[in-house]
Image (cartoon, helix red, strand yellow):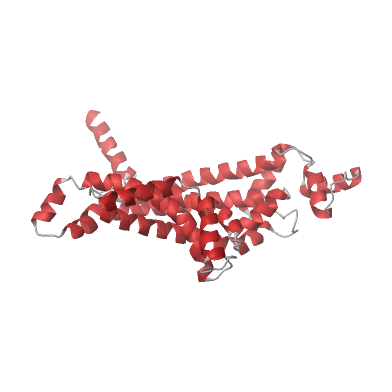
Amino acid sequence: MTLISMMGSDAVKIVAHYPIVWFTRRIFSGVVVVWAALTFAFLIQCVLPGDRAQIIINATSGNVGLASSAELAAINAKYGFDQPLAIQYGRYILRILHGDLGESYQQHRPVAGIIAEQIGPTIILAVTALLLAWIIAILTTLFIAGRDNMWAKLLNDTQVFFATAPPYWLATILLVVFAVKLRIFPVIGGSSPAGLILPTLALALELSGFFGQVVQNEFTRVLEQPFVASARARGMSDFGVRLRHVLRHAALPGITLSGWALGKLLSGAILIEVVFARQGLGGVLVAATSSRDVPIVSGAVLISAGLFVLVSLIVDLTYRLVDPRIKLT
């Protein structure tokens, strides 16, 4: 029995490291996250103060007067608000499974179409900011980690400053200095490459400071490992050792945080888009929030959850590629 138990234990370990099992577990956890976001989005519509039918009528008519009982009954019947909460929830989940995010109260259009039209510029801004943040963090780390001189201290203090500076504050400073005063970049971002530079910097600078501090601490620790001394003994230059050997190990904590960072960037991009008057989800969500257009807000919550799950999966795979010793468990 003991031998059988040991064989069974070994089999479980082998299966646990098998990629199909890993993907299955990740997909299941992703489904749970998306389901939780769906439930949260549904509860938003139910717990907000005020009559939902009255809100829809006010958003449609543009006034704040009380609607008649007949008008309220018609809206309740149209959207199913007169049904028990469990039935409303079940229908809501079925609609989502069929790709129906509902209809905007304000625009009277499918929410999926509205989000699809606006999410592209927001994703481009977030991904560009993430890449730029990594470039800045890697370059500064390569030059200052493990060094004790004036420039290293200055760059380190700059990283700390950016890591603690709110992105919307940085966005306002960049807008006033480089767009309004110097007129190097357009005041209104638009969709041109030039209009992408300042919003990207506003998001990337804060994140680069955060990444830089995390990677730099790990970089300094890795510099003391025996394999670094071995690489130097073989005649490799200091910069070559830092770039080819130390950086791979030091970047792992930052890669782990990249999934969280991209989610943070997506939410931060919405505020930055409003500051620079860029096309994207920012203006749509601000208008939807002010008019209490719940379907658009709920749809954005759902899309954000789906993107978070996808990015987390990509980050886990990247983590494995950077260090092949890490198993998919």
Please tell me which residue lies in front, 23 or 39: 39
Please tell me which residue lies in front, 299 or 167: 167
Return the residue found at the far top.
Answer: 1
Tell me residue 92's x, y (percent): 67, 47
Q: Residue at x 22, y 58 (%)?
A: 244
> In this rendering, would 243 be left or right of 166?
left
> In this rendering, would 63 be left or right of 16?
right
Q: Residue at x 37, y 49 (%)?
A: 159
Return the residue found at the far front.
Answer: 181
Q: Is residue 143 above or below residue 72?
A: below
Tell me residue 269's x, y (percent): 54, 55
> In this rendering, would 198 be left or right of 56?
left
Q: Is residue 178 above or below residue 33?
A: below
> In this rendering, would 224 be left or right of 294?
left
**Residue 53 appears in the rendering:** yes
Tell me the quarter of the picture where residue 248 sits: bottom left
Please tell me which residue lies in front, 264 or 108: 264
Quadrant containing the C terminus in the rendered view? top left
Q: Residue at x 32, y 50 (%)?
A: 154
Number of on-image labels? 0
Quadrant containing the N terminus in the rendered view? top left
Tell me residue 268's x, y (percent): 53, 51
**Residue 20 appears in the rendering:** no
Tell me residue 116's x, y (percent): 61, 62
